[in-house]
């Protein structure tokens, strides 16, 4: 079994503030972490590996050089190999350009090693909340996808996934290869051991640049990004409401009608 997990290093959103003048995120001094949904995806992959020890888990990330730290965290909790896609040419990419670049990197890894049976992604990154990259990778690769997974198990040549829905849960089966995006399950990612952390710190992470993978230059970075973020801002606090209390229910209803009519809501 050959599994790939796509991960992203993100700023800890509990520490982020927005500059009131520029309306941009203040990243200075903000710690970076492995995107939590990606950590859940890696844990599900590691649980599959626990049951099938011959499984190999590769983690792949696209980002600046400091994202190596996130990849080493992944190596410490179950991943076997790690690759970083990093080049200034990839900068400014939106989700479409990001998914295209990652797909090209996946193609390179498969050509050099072996095809991936499963590709896991977190359902979304907490710094963007788009939930688009995983499904777009599936579309680029023209393979099945299952979203909002909270459990997964391999049976024969199929992957069985417990999927969260608005009404409850459903069990889906898909042929492999398959892309699976993971939401928050009912368990937490495992902790690294001292031995695994030391081994991960010594690991050499291979970096793939624009010269290492075959890409169309018009589909990467800013050139390949049809969407742009106009600005980020803190939403204004909700205004307090009003209470309508009259002597009778009929008078209260009439007063409410007058208020809504004056506000052109009726």
Image (cartoon, rainbow, N blue to C red):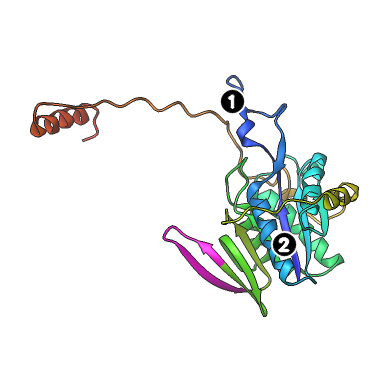
The relative height of residue 2 versus residue 75 in the rendered view (above or below) is below
Q: What is the crowding at mark 2: few (fewer than 14 residues within 10 Å), some, or many (at least 20)?
A: many
Residue 68 in sight here: yes
The relative height of residue 13 versus residue 2 in the rendered view (above or below) is above
Q: Quadrant of the C terminus?
A: top left
Q: Quadrant of residue 79?
A: bottom right
Q: Quadrant of the N terminus?
A: bottom right
Q: Which residues are magenta?
A: 162-174
> Which tag is nearer the camera, tag 2 or tag 1?
2
Q: Nearer the viewer, residue 25 or 250?
A: 250
Measuring from the top left, give residue 167's x and y in whole percent. Answer: 41, 60
Query: Residue at 54% of width from left, 71% of height from top?
Result: 172
Q: Look at the magenta stretch and give its main secondary structure.
A: strand
Q: Nearer the viewer, residue 124 or 53?
A: 53
Q: Is residue 172 magenta?
A: yes
The relative height of residue 243 versus residue 12 in the rendered view (above or below) is above
Residue 216 in sight here: no
Find disc 1 in the rendering and name its residue.
23
Q: Would residue 264 be found to the left or right of residue 90 on screen?
A: left
Measuring from the top left, give residue 58's x and y in whole percent. Answer: 79, 60
Q: Quadrant of residue 43?
A: bottom right
Contact (Cβ within 8 Å) of mark 2 with mark 1 = no
SS label for mark 1: loop
Find disc 2 in the rendering and name its residue.
46
The relative height of residue 172 versus residue 42 in the rendered view (above or below) is below
Q: CA distance from mark 2 to mark 1?
A: 39 Å
Measuring from the top left, give residue 89's x and y in whole percent. Answer: 79, 43
């Amino acid at each position: 079994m050959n599994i790939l997990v796509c991960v992203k290093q993100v700023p800890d959103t509990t520490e982020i503030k927005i500059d009131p003048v520029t309306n941009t995120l203040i990243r200075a001094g903000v710690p970076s972490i492995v995107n939590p949904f990606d950590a859940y995806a890696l844990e599900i992959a590691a649980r599959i590996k626990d049951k099938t020890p011959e499984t190999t888990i590769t983690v792949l990330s696209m980002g600046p050089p400091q994202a190596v730290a996130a990849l080493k965290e992944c190596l410490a909790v179950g991943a076997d190999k790690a690759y970083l896609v990093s080049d200034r040419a990839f900068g400014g990419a939106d989700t479409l350009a990001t998914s295209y670049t990652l797909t090209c990197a996946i193609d390179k890894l498969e050509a050099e090693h072996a095809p991936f049976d499963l590709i896991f992604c977190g359902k979304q990154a907490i710094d963007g909340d788009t939930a688009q990259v995983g499904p777009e990778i599936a579309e680029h690769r023209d393979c099945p996808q299952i979203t909002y997974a909270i459990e997964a198990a391999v049976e024969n040549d199929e992957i069985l996934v417990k999927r969260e829905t608005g009404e409850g849960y459903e069990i889906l089966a898909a042929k492999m290869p398959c892309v699976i995006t993971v939401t928050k399950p009912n368990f937490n990612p495992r902790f690294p051991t001292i031995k695994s952390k030391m081994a991960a710190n010594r690991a050499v992470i291979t970096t793939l640049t624009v010269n290492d993978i075959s890409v169309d230059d018009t589909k990467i970075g800013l050139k390949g990004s049809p969407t742009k973020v106009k600005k980020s801002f803190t939403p204004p606090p909700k205004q307090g409401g009003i209470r309508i209390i009259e002597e009778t229910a009929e008078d209260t209803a009439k007063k409410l009608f007058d208020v809504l009519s004056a506000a052109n809501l009726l």
